[in-house]
Image (cartoon, rainbow, N blue to C red):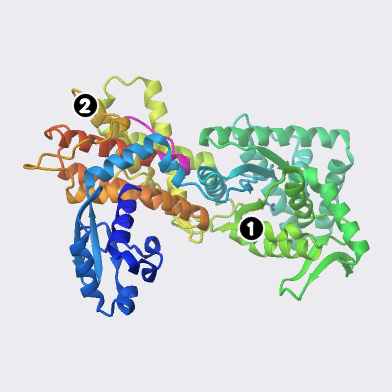
Amino acid sequence: MGFRADVLRALEGALGADVAAAGDLDAALTTPPKIEMGDLAFPCFALAKVKKKAPPAIAAELAATIAPTGAIAKVQALGPFVNFHADPAKQLDDLCQRLVDGRFDAEARTDAPARVMIEFSQPNTHKLFHVGHLRNVVLGDALVRAFRARGHDVVAANYYGDFGIDVAKCLWWIRTRPEETVPVEHRIAWLGSCYVRATQLVAELEESDPETATTTKASIREVLRGMEEGDPEIRALYEETRQWCLDGFQAIYDQLDVRFDHDFFESQVEHEGQAIVDEQLAKGVFVESQGAIICDLTEEGLGACLVRKGDGASLYMTWDLALARRKFDDFDVERSMYVVGSEQRHHFQQLFATLARMGYERAKDCRHVAYELVMLPSGKMSSRKGTAIPLHVLWDTVRDAIRTRMESEGRDERAGWDATRWNETVERVVVACLKYGMLHVTNNRRVVFDVEAWTNPEGDTGAYLLYALARIAGIQRKAEGPVPTLADGVQDGGASEGEAFGHETERALLGHLLTWPDVLARMESTCEPAVVATFLFDATKLFSRFYAACPILKAPEPLRTARLQLVNATEAVLRRGFEVLGLPVVDAM
Ligand code: ARG
């Protein structure tokens, strides 16, 4: 805050008795539209009345009385504004110190830390884990990381869909087709195909042979009952296949470096949900309607919320009633966030309205964070039609593209890499490309998966960001002689004659790095990782401009030290952004 604090102090001094009329000085300061115009600007409009002068005249008067001190290098009147130019070397020195002593991160934290639960991923067992599920995982994980960086106490929660009629369909298919062999690899995908084939069969029978359709549906319901009531054979099959899925999901989370603090399961909240329905039915909050039980939300404009089916079975909504309460009761959270696709918007509106009807005050602390679908350039994916891409296929496609590209460019850094080093680096680039590809699109826009666009090392991609980090590490490696660490700061930005620190590209990069605390705050308030993705992409572009325009290692001292510190500070801030988005890092590529 060195420069800004100096500006405020200088303004207060120059304004003297008029300071009260000027209002909140800190809030009044703006950033000039062009960096050549200065780093901060003070508009003089509010002073026109007391001073009985036109704003440009006031600006000229103030500019003439303020002498450059501290981090202020130059003061200039520009129309109705007083523009302040920072001394870039002092500003950089200040940034280095704040990065080292923790003030920079402290500034990025909220004044109102809370205990927050973020529920995300929530895959269904016995169904394919596809590309769309990846968007949820990386979005939810980025929110967890961002909320933590902001100083909140976050409980990262998963909620597995491991129960219900869809699971029963899958098990029914397996039981009625004992001749099918279970694959050793990609068992989740196979279970998903059993579910899809059972669903398709029922749909076909409904067209061609309604009688068989009815008996088939009855035997699927039998399987569900077996699951519920503990039929040993069905239970055993259920437990085994469920575990395959949970193990498979865990492997995906490990690959993505995603961790949960707590796992909820639909199977766990089933009974509790039913109990809530009985309780609310007795209170008259829920009512019977055509044999089923509903919460009437006509007044809220949300129609009837079905909480129990006519046959007495509970459903997705029933379980969510129990889950919502558990989150507050068992975890003592102040806020509860649900990261779920926007196609479930109505479901969550109904859920929160129903909780409110139940008199549950915490309903107001629940929030649905919605996001759009993932598409292929050829259009929408559908699990049922078999056009959804399984995650492992996407992963392999991206890996092939990255490996081919990396192998085609001979780089000195990679000479002598063994297979382990190669594989590990490729894998990190793959994860960065997958996550960044999902995260740089705002939540309300569809993500289109396009392998070329996602892996282009010169495009808006994870690979491009990693190249920048690798290049920074390369500069630090290549430096002969003393390399300053951030703690050394910048004593001097350059000689009075000759080149000094403060080239336009240096100031632009520095100015951008300084916005990080605001960027993180904005990601929290909007729940948009794209805010941070854009920040990182811009930082990387600004770094490339600086690198192209300014020699670093060959610069004379003290300019060399200042430039190396700008490189160090860029690295430090980029790493914070990478951490928040959950992107892996590399030091060579
Ligand atoms: N498993 C569900 C699905 O795939 C999503 C669960 C979302 N969370 C919730 N509390 N309803 O549709």
Of residues 455 and 347, the one drawn nearer to the viewer in this rendering: 347
Q: Is residue 268 left or right of residue 504?
A: right
Tell me where residue 121 appears, x and y as whole percent. 61, 45
Q: Residue at x 61, y 54 (%)?
A: 340
State yes or no: residue 416 in magenta: no
- What residue span does the magenta drawing correspond to? 576-589
Give me the disc on residue 478: 2
- The quadrant of the picture occupied by the C terminus is top left
Quarter of the image for residue 12 reads: bottom left
Please determine whether, in this image, residue 389 is positioned above or below residue 555: below
The furthest residue to the left:
497
- What residue type is disc 1 on? Arg
Q: In the image, is 141 to the left or to the right of 270?
A: left
Instruction: Name the residue furthest front.
Output: 17
Give the image location of residue 470, x and y in percent: 31, 33
Residue 583 among those drawn in magenta: yes
In the rendered view, tell whether residue 526 sits above or below residue 457: below
Secondary element under disc 1, as helix, strand or loop, is strand
Question: Which of the two residues, 401 or 578, is positioned nearer the viewer here?
Answer: 578
Residue 140, x across and y down, in percent: 56, 47
Q: What's the distance in space between the residues labelled 1 and 2, CA to CA?
A: 49 Å
